[in-house]
Image: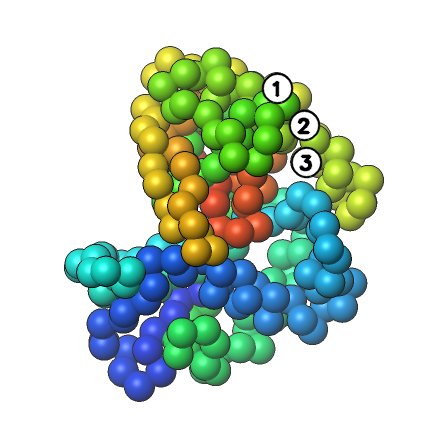
Amino acid sequence: MRVKLLLYSRDDKQRLLTIPLDFRHYFISLIKTILQPSPSLFSRFQQEKPGYSPYVFNVSFARILVAHQDMLDVVPPLTVTISTGDMMWFTSFCNGAIALKGQETVLGLDVGGIDLCQPVVMGKAAGVFSIRGHACLRKAASGNDAYVDPVNLAEVEESINSQAIVKARFLKSYWNIAAQYSPVVVLPESRLSKGVCSHYGGKLTTVRGSLVLAGGADSLQFLYDYGVGVRTGQGFGLAEVIKQYD
C-alpha cells in the first residue's frame, strides 16, 4: 500500500526548487509530523533504538536540473512516496497527510497533492524490482559501515535475506504485523551498481539499479511493501515492481 505526497514551493507551484544534497533527514522530520496525530505510532520516534521501520519512503523529483556545491536545483513537484504493508500504518499516513494539505512543511514546501497508488499484489514466482534512488545493503554479520559490493550477487542476496528475516520477526513481535518472509534468490539478470549518497553530514555507500528476484509471493510482497535493505525509515530501499513472471 502506497501514498504519494506532491510538494511544491509555497509561493509558486511552477517555481524551481533548490534543496540540499543531504535532504533525507528533512523528510524524516516530515514523516514524524505526519504520524504525530497517532500517538501509538509516533512513539517509535521517542525511542533511543526504534528498531526496524514498519514502512519505507522515497523522495524523488520531476527532474534534476543541476547540482552545485551541496545543493540541487530540481523541477517541481517533489514527490514523497510512503509504502507499508500494514493497514493501521497506511491509514495513519493517509490521514496525517490529508491534515497537512495546503500547509507548509519542510524546506518551505507545501503539500499540494495526495495520490493513493494502485495496489500491487505479488502473485508470480519472480519479479523485476527497480530501486528508486538508493538502497543500503549491509553485509550480513558485519558492522554498520560494511556495505555489499553490488557486483557480488551472492553477497547482495545474503544481505537482503538476512535483514528481511530479522525485520519480519521484529515487525511481528513488536508491532503485531503479520509479516511473512522466507529467503529469495537474486537472479543473474539483476543490474546493480555502486552509489554514494550524502546523509546526515556524511557519505553512505549504496546500491542502485534493478533486482530480479525469485521466491514466494509473501516474500516478494514483503520487499515491495517494506523496502530492500536497511535504513528504509530514512529514505532508502523503496523499489517499484516493473513486471512479474513465472
Q: Quadrant of residue 109?
A: bottom left
User: Nearer the viewer's eye, disc 3 or disc 1?
Assistant: 3
Q: Mark 1 points at which residue?
A: 183
x, y percent for residue 21: 33, 58
Q: Is residue 199 left or right of residue 36?
A: left
Q: Mark 3 points at which residue?
A: 167
Neighbour tally class for label 1: few under 14, some 14-19, many 20 plus, Cα within 10 Å: some
Residue at left offset 43%, top offset 50%: 202
**Amino acid type of the residue tagged 1 in the rendering:** Pro
Neighbour tally class for label 2: few under 14, some 14-19, many 20 plus, Cα within 10 Å: some
Q: Earlier in the sequence, mark 2 or mark 1?
A: 2
Give the distance between the C-alpha atoms of the residues marked 3 and 1, in whole angstroms.
13 Å
Up the image or down, 34 lies above or below 206; here it is below
Q: Is mark 3 on a helix, strand or loop?
A: helix
Q: Name the residue under label 2.
A: 165
Q: Is residue 122 left or right of residue 23?
A: right
Residue sitting at the far left = 65
x, y percent for residue 56: 55, 48
Q: Is residue 57 left or right of residue 141?
A: left
Give the distance between the C-alpha atoms of the residues marked 3 and 2, in whole angstroms.
5 Å
Residue at left offset 32%, top offset 66%: 19
Residue at left offset 53%, top offset 77%: 100
Q: Is residue 80 visible?
A: yes
**Amino acid type of the residue tagged 3 in the rendering:** Lys
